[in-house]
Amino acid sequence: MQCLKKIALAAVLAAAMVCSAKELKVLTIGNSFADSAFHYLPSVVKSVPGCKIEMDRANIGGCTLERHWNEHQKAEKDPNYKPYGWSRKKRTLREILTSKKWDVVTIQQGSYQSWKPESYEPYAENLIKLIRELAPQAEIVIQQTWSYRIDDGRFKNWKIGQTEMYDRLTKCYRDLAKKYQLRVIPTGAAVQLTRAKTPDSEKFKSYDPAILKTLRWPDLPPQAGDVVGKFYWYKNRKTGEMYIACDAPHLNARGDYLQACLWFAALYGRKTSDVKFIPNMIGKSDAEFLQQCAQEALDTFPQAKK
């Protein structure tokens, strides 16, 4: 019991330190849903006087908590096995965690397992223990991921919809946060708020997949109305022909900005309205809308009581 009180006190002190800090070192242990935070967060932070950020990542595309733990175990047994990074800069999780005095280390589940409670343990516990061992000064923060755009084909296979995926993953993340007394960056809640606040006439609507075969470059199907998902053209390397691809799980540019504003407010204890940076492809009024949704999500998401 005394040990648990000490852990809780350490978490509170770490959170207080983060809120008052102006320069943060942030490490993400995740996947592409954490990679997207790197798109705009540095520019967002830079736009606020006195705030600085240094970011690094231990991310692997599609990586689950289970795989992160398994990769760590494999690397501990084989000194030549380095699963993170690119060919010229391969590293282990141990090397990354001890490379700097991190202020914040974020964790998250792989999105396709995020709504399955049985997928979290014992891997989350193992990773949290490892972080506390190798980076004891860091606050561990959970990023709540989001539900896919409505046209993702996996919904049919899973026999759930967008809202049910969101509700289930939210419960999983809240349970995880409560168990380990961790803060949550509610990116999924911010995404869901933008969907709810977008007028019905502007919401992204499902479409007949057959339409994709009727379009010619550079035309694309209507895709406004959601901060998740995008269509894009790509060339098949073998045939040389152009095809339309659909990315329904990942954030688009609007979603990247939403995520960046939310992370800034959560990590620095500031308001999203303090952010001065707006990407060239996002208008001022839309940027303000996204900032407001990020702030509301942060203000209303139920955090674990310390």
Image: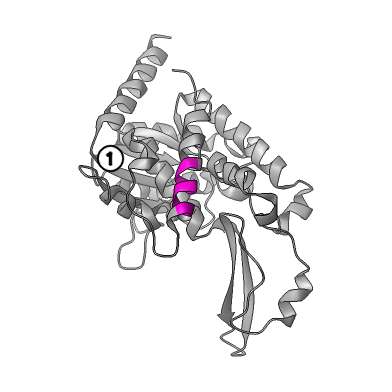
Residue 23 locus on image (x, y percent): 22, 41
Left or right side of 300 for 80? left
Residue 272 locus on image (x, y percent): 39, 41
Q: Residue furthest top?
A: 2
Helix, strand or loop: magenta stretch:
helix
Is residue 210 in sight in this rendering?
yes
Residue 204 locus on image (x, y percent): 67, 57
142 inside magenta stretch: no
288 inside magenta stretch: yes
- Badge 1 crowding class, 10 Å Cα cut-off, few under 14, some 14 to 19, many 20 or more, is many
Give the residue at mark 1: 102
- Looking at the rendered structure, the kind of residue marked 1 is Trp
The residue lying at 62 percent from left, 31 percent from top is: 171
Q: Quadrant of the N terminus?
A: top left
The residue lying at 78 percent from left, 74 percent from top is: 210
Is residue 34 in sight in this rendering?
no
